């Protein structure tokens, strides 16, 4: 595995509070989001997302369709 120049601290994906507000608005949810709600949402989202499967699927895509470089 060649990865000498890969920044291993790089964030690949993240969600913001604005993303939460967008979902509330787009789904017409009657939720008045409070600051204290953010921690619970953060915890729950982490529980709902199968990070291992998401990464594994992306790696399978890469393996099946490698990026062509010049």
Image (spheres, rainbow, N blue to C red):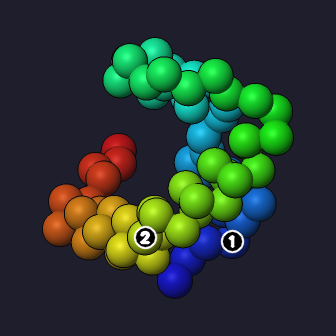
Is residue 68 placed above or below 30 in the rendered structure?
Answer: below
| Chain-order first, disc 2 or disc 1 | 1
**Residue at image point 73% right, 42% down:** 38
Q: Which residue is mark 1?
A: 4
Residue 32 drawn at (x, y percent): 64, 22
Marks 2,1: beta carbons within 8 A: no
In the rendering, which numbered label is found on residue 37? none
In the rendering, which numbered label is found on residue 50? 2
Q: In the image as oriented, which residue stretches furthest toward the right? A: 36
Residue 8 drawn at (x, y percent): 72, 65
**Residue at image point 65% right, 34% down:** 16
Q: Quadrant of residue 54?
A: bottom left
**Does residue 2 show up?**
yes
**Does residue 59 show up?**
no
Disc 2 versus disc 1: nearer the observer: 2
SS under mark 1: loop
**Residue at image point 52% right, 83% down:** 1
Residue 70 drawn at (x, y percent): 35, 44
Count neighbours of disc 1 (C-alpha within 10 A) and say few if under 14, some if 14 to 19, many if 20 or more: few
3D distance between C-alphas at marks 2 and 1? 28 Å
């Amino acid at each position: 595995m060649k990865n000498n120049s890969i920044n291993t601290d790089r964030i690949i994906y993240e969600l913001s509070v604005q993303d939460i507000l967008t979902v509330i608005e787009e789904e017409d949810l009657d939720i008045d989001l409070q600051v204290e709600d953010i921690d619970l949402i953060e915890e729950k989202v982490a529980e709902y997302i199968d990070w291992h499967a998401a990464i594994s699927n992306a790696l399978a895509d890469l393996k099946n369709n490698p990026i062509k470089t010049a």
